[in-house]
Image: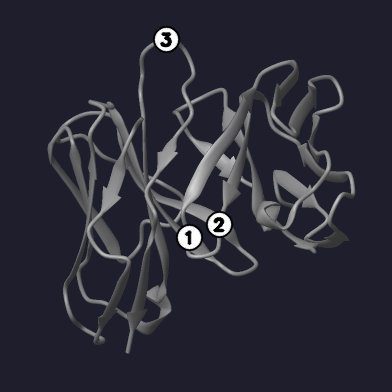
Amino acid sequence: DVKVTQSSRYLVKRTGEKVFLECVQDMDHENMFWYRQDPGLGLRLIYFSYDVKMKEKGDIPEGYSVSREKKERFSLILESASTNQTSMYLCASSSLSGGYQPQHFGDGTRLSIL
Amino acid sequence: KNEVEQSPQNLTAQEGEFITINCSYSVGISALHWLQQHPGGGIVSLFMLSSGKKKHGRLIATINIQEKHSSLHITASHPRDSAVYICAADLNRDDKIIFGKGTRLHILP
């Protein structure tokens, strides 16, 4: 079974802090994604990566950056956290092989910015 | 207008009832996903469809490409089916997925 592991289930940070959310997958997937989920807005794509050191902006990249130094790890960085970044953050991965593949999700990180 | 619309937003039903959740989309897709999100956040992929119908246990997913519509059905619903069900459209480009806002299902014992 694919496992996507997010480093924290709950995280509380202060405004202005630099925040790192880590995601690791164990199935050698090429694609990795970061989403945020807010009530009434559903899941929205922040950034995705289809290879090591490659990244693409999603629908709401402002205020975020990402890092993919190794294939299995995709980090989401809040350079200077703000209260409007309080949200549930979900990481996902998928394979490029064999046509279209479903995304596998982590359990999520509920981030609160005070 | 959202490119992926789900209905209903919220659904409460009694145990044993047949459940239908609908998803309409307005974009060209390569596949459509149904996801289940349990309380606490974990998301599980239930189905990926590009045509026809798929069945897994008490869950059935159908898609009509011409009408750009998909349905998720749950037969003999059970309280453990209580979750948020999310429809997601896999676009014909860029590996991007557009998510519906989810349907919150609550099955009463």
The residue under the point 50% across, 48% down is: B43
Viewer-side residue, A25 vs B55 = B55
| CA gap, disc 2 and disc 1 | 6 Å
Tell me the residue at 74%/34% (across/down): B58
Please give the name of the residue rendered at 42% of the width and 37% of the height, measured from the top-left corner.
Answer: A104
The residue that label 3 is drawn on is A98
Q: Please, what is the three-letter code of the amino acid marked with disc 2?
A: His
* Camera-side residue of B43 and A34: B43
Tell whether label 2 touches label 3 (CB within 8 Å): no
Neighbour tally class for label 1: few under 14, some 14-19, many 20 plus, Cα within 10 Å: many
Give me the disc on residue B38.
2
Say whether residue A92 is left or right of residue A69. Answer: right
Q: Residue furthest left?
A: A69
Chain letter of disc 3 in the image: A
The single residue placed furthest to the top in the displayed view is: A98
| Label 3, label 2: how far apart the Cα atoms are | 29 Å
Residue B72 showing in the rendered view: yes
Mark 2 in CB contact with mark 1 (< 8 angstroms) = yes
Q: Is residue A10 above or below residue B31?
A: below
Tag 2 and tag 1 share a subunit: yes
Residue B101 visible: no
